[in-house]
């Protein structure tokens, strides 16, 4: 779990992913079997040349949801806006890291105590981050500037034998799994070109997916992303410890029947647990789906409780299922099977 702990503790909101990118680049550099491929927006991939002409691309996304400083009040408190989807109701009574040119300082979004008998306005226009300053000038002396990023406090804790609580599970899961695959497949040969890495700015419009797909032009694209569970009361078809998420539908990507049949057949043949999943959100696979002439694309999803909040809970048995499924797809694919998938054929994998 070393990669996951390090990555989930690092800060990296959309447009400010350099800490994660540096970590990924250093990992790729350990393996001379790969070249580093980067685009101008910041996405990064390990590239292994194959013996054929097809291309397969695996991508997590580096960015986590967070906030940006958009104002400083005369009293030295910070106005913020979300960078990515964060419900304002969950930000109260939390401590945050404010990333300034002078380093990280602490900030707190307070909740009105019941003693004051005042109504709490929970919207970003009224939410303030208290950094202890008493004036705009003092806030500036602490290094705060407009555009500074704010992140949830770093966190990674093992709760039970299999379950972990961490910041930025969405989507350092995908980045960590990409790094594990890079190492696991370093001595494997393929008859297709393999690209494994991570995109930027997924949380604000799948932007890094578009630029990196334009750079690589893959035939097959697999997104690695975390998706929300609501299974704490047990009344749901989806839950932790039921396997990877087979994303059948989201608002921007409906899985074709031929692709579902191929993935399900492969998972069952290798005894990899999976669960059918319908989502209200999207992943980088949605961007790949309608680019160029249409790219064969899907998501290998990690079930996680409480994403887009200060911390989320995941189960390492599901993480293992995600790893096994992605690796099995990659070691099963070849040029002819890729061409079969592009034609929409059943029983290819």
Image (cartoon, rainbow, N blue to C red):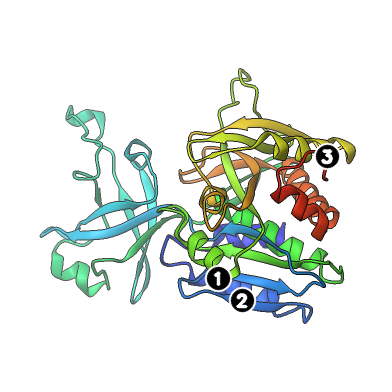
Residue neighbourhood size for the residue with mark 3, other residues' Cα within 10 Å, grouped as few (<14), some (14–19), many (≥20): some
Cα distance in 3D space between marks 3 and 2? 33 Å
Front of the two marks 3 and 2: 3
Q: Name the residue under label 2.
A: 37
Q: Position of residue 235 (x, y in %)?
A: 61, 17
Residue neighbourhood size for the residue with mark 2, other residues' Cα within 10 Å, grouped as few (<14), some (14–19), many (≥20): some
Q: Name the residue under label 3.
A: 347
Q: Position of residue 335 (x, y in %)?
A: 80, 60
Is the C terminus in the top left, top right, bottom left or bottom right quadrant?
Answer: top right
Q: SS at mark 3?
A: loop
Q: Tell me whether the residue at label 3 lies in contact with that at label 2, contact meaning CB atoms closer than 8 angstroms.
A: no
Tell me: residue 138, above or below residue 221. below
Task: Answer yes or no: is residue 161 visible.
Answer: no
Q: Tell me whether the residue at label 3 lies in contact with that at label 1, contact meaning CB atoms closer than 8 angstroms.
A: no
Tell me: residue 100, above or below residue 260. below
The quarter holding residue 316 reads top right
Mark earlier in primary sequence (3, 2): 2
Residue 298 versus residue 158: which sits nearer the camera? 298
Q: Which residue is at 83% across, 39% downward?
A: 347
Cα distance in 3D space between marks 1 and 2? 9 Å
Task: Answer yes or no: is residue 269 visible.
Answer: yes
Residue 309 versus residue 328: which sits nearer the camera? 328
Q: Where is residue 305 in the image (x, y as percent from the top left)?
A: 57, 36
Q: Name the residue under label 1.
A: 215
Tell me: residue 92, above or below residue 175. above
Whether residue 121 sits left or right of residue 180 in the image: it is left
Whether residue 108 sits left or right of residue 342 in the image: it is left
Q: SS at mark 1?
A: helix
């Amino acid at each position: 779990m070393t990669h996951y702990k390090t990555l989930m503790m690092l800060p990296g909101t959309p447009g400010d992913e350099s800490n994660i990118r540096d970590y990924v680049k250093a990992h790729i550099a350990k393996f001379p079997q790969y070249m580093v491929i980067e685009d101008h927006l910041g996405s990064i991939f390990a590239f292994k040349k194959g013996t054929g002409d097809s291309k397969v691309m695996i991508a997590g996304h580096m960015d986590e949801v967070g906030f940006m400083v958009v104002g400083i009040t005369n009293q030295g408190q910070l106005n913020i806006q979300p960078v990515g989807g964060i419900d304002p109701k969950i930000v109260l009574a939390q401590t945050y890291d404010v990333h300034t040119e002078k380093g990280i300082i602490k900030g707190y979004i307070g909740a009105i105590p019941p003693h004051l008998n005042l109504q709490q306005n929970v919207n970003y226009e009224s939410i303030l981050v208290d950094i202890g300053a008493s004036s705009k000038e003092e806030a500036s002396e602490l290094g705060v500037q407009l555009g500074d990023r704010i992140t949830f406090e770093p966190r990674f804790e093992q709760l039970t034998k299999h379950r972990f609580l961490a910041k930025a599970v969405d989507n350092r899961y995908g980045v960590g799994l990409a790094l594990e695959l890079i190492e696991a497949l370093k001595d494997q040969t393929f008859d297709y070109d393999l690209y494994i890495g991570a995109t930027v700015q997924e949380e604000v419009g799948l932007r890094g997916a578009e630029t990196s797909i334009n750079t690589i032009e893959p035939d097959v694209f697999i997104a690695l992303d975390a998706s929300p569970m609501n299974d704490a009361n047990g009344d749901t078809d989806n839950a932790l410890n039921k396997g990877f998420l087979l994303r059948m539908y989201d608002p921007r990507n409906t899985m074709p029947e031929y692709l579902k049949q191929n993935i399900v057949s492969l998972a069952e043949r290798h005894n990899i647990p999976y669960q059918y999943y319908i989502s209200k959100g999207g992943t980088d696979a949605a961007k790949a789906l309608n680019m160029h002439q249409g790219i064969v694309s899907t998501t290998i999803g990690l079930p996680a409780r409480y994403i887009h909040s200060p911390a989320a809970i995941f189960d390492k048995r599901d993480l293992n299922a995600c790893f096994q499924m992605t690796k099995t797809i990659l070691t099963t694919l070849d040029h002819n099977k890729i061409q079969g998938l592009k034609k929409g054929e059943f029983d290819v994998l």
